Image: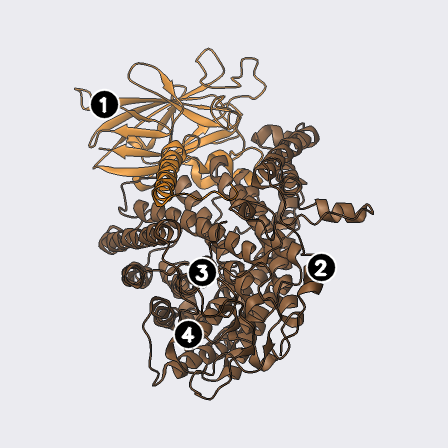
Chain colours: A orange, B brown
Amino acid sequence: MKGVRLSKGARAGALLFGFAALIGLLIFAVAGYLRTSPPTVSVGASSSGSVNLVMQTDGAVGVGPHPSWVGYFVQDASGAWHQTTLIQLPQNTDVHVTLYEYDSGGNLRNSAWSKIEGTAGGVAYINGTAESVVNPNTNTGNGIAHTFNVPALGINVPMYGVSGSAKNFCSTGPCNTSQAHNTITFSFHTGGAGIFRWQCFVPCGLGYLEGNGGPMQNLGYMAGFLKVV
Amino acid sequence: MAIDFSQETKSGSSGAAAHKSSIFQPSIITGMVGGGLGFLFGHWAGNAIGGGYQQVVGSGQNDIAIVLGYLFAVVGWFAGLGALNYPLKKMLGFEPENVEHISEPGWGKYFRYTTDHKVVGVQYLFGMLVYFFTAGLLALAIRTELLSPTHHIWGPDTYLEIVGEHGTMMMMMMTSVVLGPFGNYVIPLMIGSKKVAFPRLEAASFWFTPISYFILLSALWQGGFQSGWTSYAPLSVQQGVGQDGYIFGFGLQGLSMICAGTNIVVTIINYRAPGMTWGRLNVMGWSMVSLGFTMILSVPVLIDGLYVLTLDRTAQTSLLYGAHGGSSFLWENLFWFFGHPEVYLLAIPGFGMVAEIVPVFARKPVFGYKTAAAGMIGLAILSFFVWQHHLFQSGMNPDMRPLFMLTTELISIPTGFIYLVGMGTLWRARIRLTVPMLFMLGVYFNFLFGGVTGVYVSDVPINVTVHGSFFVMAHFHYTIMGGVIFAFFGAIYYYTPLVTGYQLSEKLGKIHFWSMIIAFNSTFLPLFAVGLLGQPRRVFEYAARLQTLNDWVSISSYVLGLSLTFFVVTWMWQIVVTRKKSVRDPWSSRSLEWHVDSYPPPPYNFETIPVVVAGPYEYADPDALPMADIVVANAGRDVARESVR
């Protein structure tokens, strides 16, 4: 390093190499982190003009950088589960949603979220029973685990929790239907194209102040987008 | 007459002979190794301490491990750099070897802990450029997302992480962007000193910044912090471990500011050459004194706030959480008691740099020298009485709002002093439109927009309307980027001959200036309209009717990015490859820093301490004495020397 005299060409080469390395580093950073996002599961249009969307909510996703966070899995056309909250749907289509809820629940902090809205008929079927208003202290007695809210489409569907002490409680996702769960089904209409944010409104970020951090504010866990195309 | 202090100074704490260097010598490499080992140890200890708590198990994150990891990483970093060798040996009763790389040839000294203020200045210059361009790229990422109100490049969480990282990095960097490179390099030369008062403190002030940068940047890979650069509680309390990167990054930068501020104040007070009275001190010197005192008094409050936030996140105290007996106002007040003086930490050195350079190219004395100094001091003092104007919408006592509105509007008086000093200096001057001068004129142009809109946003009724909108964002970008960053680039063009011995191309510099000022205004001027039309900051979606304006802004920001890239490429090319040697005193400045034996200046600046006999700005007086009785060793010969030898 000391006393080395480089020729003009060598200095130019070193500088150009430095610039190239810098650009490579930037591409690595952007591609390696900033553009990293959960996969988008596409639900294709069927001939009947409706589609089926199958999802599950788990008490702990069990994979990725935050395995202990609550989160969603979405099933693709082949039946495989993907840990994501990005869903692509066709426009002007009826979407029949089946949600398997495997997490435990608690009281709703805001009773406004107890009313089922934005779905066909204003109802959801909880384990086969139609309900328009949920009550955390009735039905299963296990409170409300999460809500599925799409504010721009006016959708609010609260989900009853399961008993956290159930012998077959699912501790890590993706869970299967042999484990304790509630099945919630409902339908909604997509309307025109657009990107619609959806979110759980039950503060379920365990370990975070008031439960509002962590999975509540990150894609792939309790927040996502419906991409209607 | 010249007084020779050289023997006395060279035997002082900064004295050192050249010595052999090797890769095993303390350097940035050993620092990184030490930092890495320190992090691993701290992380292990943190897991041992906090790993079993339900809160940790439930959330899957252990802030104690991250915080202790960072803490020990800092200790390991400084130990690896060799910064602790001298004080530890002293404490243990040994006489340490003076290994301080003052006279060491080659590039090695720029990667070591050194007590040569000029080396520290160069380290700062490159360090701050890395900071600036990283944060600038994040700004382009923000603008890319805002190209469309509906089509998204980043997720909303990633977008907020980018915004938080950009804001924090810029605000950290800006505090040191003038003081670090130019204050450290030039001020001792300017006041006729051979060294600074606290060379180790000065070196520490720089070496806090790389680890601060890496820790802050690492937050992105740990989920970032979506609470923004202000990180209001309780949002910051409930964030993931990326928030710990914010706390440590900002805290370390705070320590850097305290070290740098203390050193520069004591240096200017105690190390001025004979005859360098306060009335002859460069305006740049006055700005540095004002800046240093403001740093020393405001930054500890930030560090206190960060400490409180750390306790809430690790020891599970509730000092910032109202429901458990604390108060989020505590953070807001601690933060802004630092945060608003910080705004002037950014502005004051920028103003000082402008006031220093404009007379050189106006060939006139500073108009109202005492007014300029009073303006700097007035800004520094008043900056401590305005912080609550950031909290007008926070639910504060409404009766307090007029008071803080008044104090905020009062601050336009010293600001006006400084502005009028500039205008007076330019009045009827024979202006030389060199590249540095163009940048300084650009500061006045941009600051007019920033300053005038500042009066509006300080007004409570208008603040209620525009708070949290892009209007405020445009305002502070005009003051900070339009002010201090333009001054920073002007200073780079101005001082490159002194620092490197090489002259830069006027033509390339002018291309950079004109493209930058046009793109800058094209980027930020429409944002006033965007804000008034209702677009909020920190939201990645916006009303479709604002897309045209947003697209204009985003495309302009890319042009701004290209202009800055043009600067990097051409500037580096000229100082690394083409290397056109500078002539002596290329700008015909009277100031002492240009009247040294060689460019770059020799290790101890002056062979003999100069005796100052006149002021630095007496350009209009043909009979004015030179500023100092100074002996230049090779006057009339080639002044540029190889900086790497």
Task: Check the residue under mark 1 and report the chain it is in.
Answer: A
Pointers 4 and 1 in contact (C-beta within 8 Å)? no
Q: Nearer the viewer, mark 2 or mark 3?
A: 3
Earlier sequence position, callout 4 versus callout 2: 2
Residue B397: in sight, yes or no?
no
Q: In percent of the image, x 31 and y 33: which residue is there?
A: A226
Dot 3 corresponds to which residue? Answer: B640
Q: In percent of the image, x 18 and y 24: which residue is there?
A: A49
Q: Residue A41 lies in what quarter of the image?
A: top left
Cα distance in 3D space between marks 4 and 2: 33 Å
Say what secondary structure mark 3 lies in.
Answer: loop
The image position of residue B353, as x and y in percent, is 46, 69
Q: Amino acid at mark 3?
A: Ala
Q: Amino acid at mark 1?
A: Gly
The image position of residue B209, as x and y in percent, is 55, 49
Task: From this view, report whether residue A95 is shown above or below residue B126.
Answer: above
Cα distance in 3D space between marks 2 and 3: 28 Å
To the question of a shared chain for discs 4 and 1, the answer is no
Q: Nearer the viewer, mark 2 or mark 1?
A: 2
To the question of a shared chain for discs 1 and 3, the answer is no
